[in-house]
Amino acid sequence: MSDMLVKLYDLPDDRSFTAEQAKQGVTIRKPIGPEKHLLLDWARETFFDEWASELDMALSGWPATCFIAVHEEKPVGFACYDATALGFFGPLGVVETHQGRGIGRALLLACLLDMKQKGYGYAIIGYAGPSDFYQKVAGAVEIPDSEPGIYRTWVRRKQG
């Protein structure tokens, strides 16, 4: 999977996604300090150790560089930026039972608009999974010759 690039300066400053999610009982917000250990445990159990590590990085700075989706006092999704490298968006995860409700779109836009507000001109989506999703929601374009990109020297656990 290649990296993708988003022109943040072209991204409309439309935050209506928060109201759309609120109508479904989902809150999109930045986490607060006392939630860190709960969110890291949840991310590790729900997704991947690597994603929990990136979430940890995003929660370790101030202000946090991540957003969470909360439904009935439980996390149902998260998205980060500046967790792997400065200017990088990701990871993005939504629990399977809540997929297809626009939560991933809302989390992506929350992060990208936060980056734009901080003065970033571009965002890089590292090792972008569903490239059509990122293209549709944020106008992302593939960066040629970017696979495996920054991840090429990543220390991995041996299999077996």
Image (tube, rainbow, N blue to C red):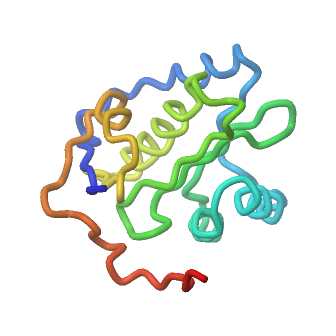
Of 25 and 101, which appears nearest the observer?
101
Foreground: 135 or 109? Answer: 135
Quarter holding the C terminus? Answer: bottom right
Q: Which residue is drawn at 53% across and 54% down?
A: 80
Q: In this view, does 42 lie above or below 111?
A: below
Residue at 51% of width from left, 55% of height from top?
Answer: 91
Question: What is the quadrant of the N terminus in the image?
Answer: bottom left
133 left or right of 17 in image: left
**Left or right: 111 with respect to 23?**
left
Tell me what residue is drawn at x 53 percent, y 48 percent: 92
Q: Furthest residue to the left? A: 144
Which residue is more in the foreground, 59 or 90? 90
Q: Is residue 11 above or below residue 118?
A: above
The answer to which quarter of the image holds residue 147 is bottom left
- To which quarter of the image does residue 48 belong? bottom right
The picture places residue 58, in percent across and down from the top left corner, at 58, 64
Rendered position, 149 above or below 97: below
